[in-house]
Amino acid sequence: MKRVALLISGSGSNMVALAQSMTGDHPGRPVVVLSNVPGAGGLAKAEAMGLATAVVDHRAFSGRDAFEAALTEALERHVPDVICLAGFMRILTPGFTARWAGKMLNIHPSLLPKYPGLHTHARALAAGDAEAGCSVHEVTEELDGGPILGQARVPVLAGDTPETLAARVLVAEHRLYPEVLRRFTAGDRRPVLFG
Ligand code: GRF
């Protein structure tokens, strides 16, 4: 059984989808939901699901290295085999990504390698793209740049705003990330491609 840590900063809808998917013959089980933001909405959802939670408030530390040292210590308490970044909005240093190399996944709301970084939906709309989507990738020291393990495509519709497009992509995220995690915990590296 693979021990899966889920890292959040906000509402945690991807965390909920992942945690709910890890049942039955799924090789993974959630062992902790960890947030860098005290009071993040996802923490209450995790507690309601009976999951262990932890907070490592990045604002309580003098710098990125001190924060990441505390984050690693909190993670190691749960001995994770896999770490899923699920709306975790901190940029991680090469030291941290190296410590967890090969074990850490992230979901990004664009069809990478297009639109790494922020404001992905506004950028897709500004470019006039006919489709958008989300990607799950292994986390490396390159921001949003690791090997892609899955992608889901959604249409861009006339009149879309960043908000309407984000909502459509989020539904696809909740389908894609659990399937990628299922394969990843089973040691199956075949990419997941939806849409
Ligand atoms: C998602 O759009 C994800 O792609 C991005 O941040 C959002 C997280 O949403 N990284 P949630 O916290 O999982 O609801």
Image (cartoon, rainbow, N blue to C red):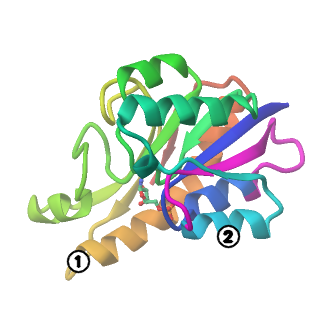
- At horizontal 46% and vertical 37% (from top left) the residue drawn is 67
Tell me if I can see residue 151 in this picture.
Answer: no
Left or right position of 75 against 195: right
Mark 1 or 2 closer to N-term?
2
The image position of residue 160, as x and y in percent, is: 24, 78
Pointers 1 and 2 in contact (C-beta within 8 Å): no
Amino acid marked by disc 1: Thr
Left or right position of 83 against 108: right
Find the magenta span and give its range. Answer: 20-39
Mark 2 surroundings: few (<14), some (14-19) or many (≥20) residues within 10 A: some
Left or right position of 153 against 120: right
**Location of mark 1 (residue):** 161
- At horizontal 49% and vertical 58% (from top left) the residue drawn is 37
Left or right position of 74 against 2: left
User: Does dot 2 land on a helix, a strand or a loop?
Assistant: helix
Q: CA distance from mark 1 to mark 2?
A: 29 Å
* Residue 82 part of the magenta segment: no
Can you tell which quarter of the image residue 140 is in? top left
- At horizontal 63% and vertical 30% (from top left) the residue drawn is 73
* Residue 23 part of the magenta segment: yes
- At horizontal 53% and vertical 68% (from top left) the residue drawn is 11
**Location of mark 2 (residue):** 44
Amino acid marked by disc 2: Ala
Looking at the rendered image, the quarter that the C terminus falls into is: bottom left
